[in-house]
Image (cartoon, helix red, strand yellow):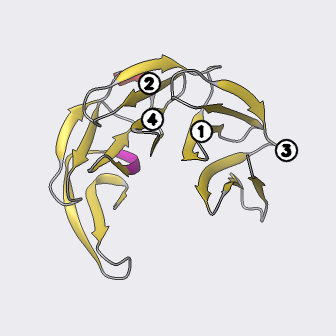
C-alpha cells in the first residue's frame, strides 16, 4: 500500500500489478504501516485512516491536530508515529496516546527492527531510539542531512535527505 498527496491510495497483491483506491479525505498523506491486521496511514492534517484490506479506508482523528505528523511504523505489538514534537502509539491503530520526543525537531522518518523504534530528524545528525515508542533516547548519526530510515536484513539503513549517494547503516 502506498499513499501520497490527495485522496488516492495504491495497493498491490504481488508488488507488480497496482490498483488505486480512495482515502476518506484529501490530505497530505505521508506514511503507511501494516501491523495487527491493519494498514494505518498518517497525514499532516487532522485525519488519519485505517484499512483491513488496503482498499476500504475508515477515517480517524489524529492524536493531536497541530503536530505535523510525518511517519509511522509498526513493531513490538504497536504502531508508533512521529511528528515535530511528539510520538503517538497505539496497539490497535485506532485509539492513540501521545508521548514527547526528546527534542522538538522535524522528526521525519521512523523504522522498527531488532526490538527498537529508530526515528531520524530531517537534514540533521539527530536520531532517537525507543523500545516502546514512549521513552526516547537521543543519539547522533555519523553526519548531517538524513532524510529516511528503514530496517531490513538485520540492519537499520538511513539515506541522505539531499541528492547525494550516501547511506549509513547500523547493526544495533
Residue found 36% across the figure and 40% down from its top: 43
- Residue named by callout 4: 80
Task: Check the image and report above or below for 74 versus 54.
Answer: above
Magenta-drawn segment: 28-33
The residues bearing labels 4 and 3 have C-alpha atoms spaced at a distance of 24 Å
Task: Check the image and report above or below for 84 versus 41.
Answer: above
Q: Position of residue 146 (x, y in %)?
A: 71, 47
Q: Position of residue 164 (x, y in %)?
A: 77, 62
Q: Depth-wise, is mark 2 or mark 1 nearer the camera?
A: 1
- Residue named by callout 2: 67
Marked residue nearer the N-terminal end (2 or 1): 2
The residues bearing labels 3 and 2 have C-alpha atoms spaced at a distance of 28 Å
Q: How packed is label 2: few (under 14 Cα within 10 Å), some, or many (20 or more)?
A: some
- Residue named by callout 3: 142
Circle 4/circle 3 CB separation < 8 Å: no
- Residue named by callout 1: 116
- Which corner quadrant of the image does residue 25 belong to? top left
Residue found 19% across the figure and 39% down from its top: 59
The residues bearing labels 2 and 1 have C-alpha atoms spaced at a distance of 23 Å
The residues bearing labels 1 and 3 have C-alpha atoms spaced at a distance of 19 Å
Amino acid at each position: 500500500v502506498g499513499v501520497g498527496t490527495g485522496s488516492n491510495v495504491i495497493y498491490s497483491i504481488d508488488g507488480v500489478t497496482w490498483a488505486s483506491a480512495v482515502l476518506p479525505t484529501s490530505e497530505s498523506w505521508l506514511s503507511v504501516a501494516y501491523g495487527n491486521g491493519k494498514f494505518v496511514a498518517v497525514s499532516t492534517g487532522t485525519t488519519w485512516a485505517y484499512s483491513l484490506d488496503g482498499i476500504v479506508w475508515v477515517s480517524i482523528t489524529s492524536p493531536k491536530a497541530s503536530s505535523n505528523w510525518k511517519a509511522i511504523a509498526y513493531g513490538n505489538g504497536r504502531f508508533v508515529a512521529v511528528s515535530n514534537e511528539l510520538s503517538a502509539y497505539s496497539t490497535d491503530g485506532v485509539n492513540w496516546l501521545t508521548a514527547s520526543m526528546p527534542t522538538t525537531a522535524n522528526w521525519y522518518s521512523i523504522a522498527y527492527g531488532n526490538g527498537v523504534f529508530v526515528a531520524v530528524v530531517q537534514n540533521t545528525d539527530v536520531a532517537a531510539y525507543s523500545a516502546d515508542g514512549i521513552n526516547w533516547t537521543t543519539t547522533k548519526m555519523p553526519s548531517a542531512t538524513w532524510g529516511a530510515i528503514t530496517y531490513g536484513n538485520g540492519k537499520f539503513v538511513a539515506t541522505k535527505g539531499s541528492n547525494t549517494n550516501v547511506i549509513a547503516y547500523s547493526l544495533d
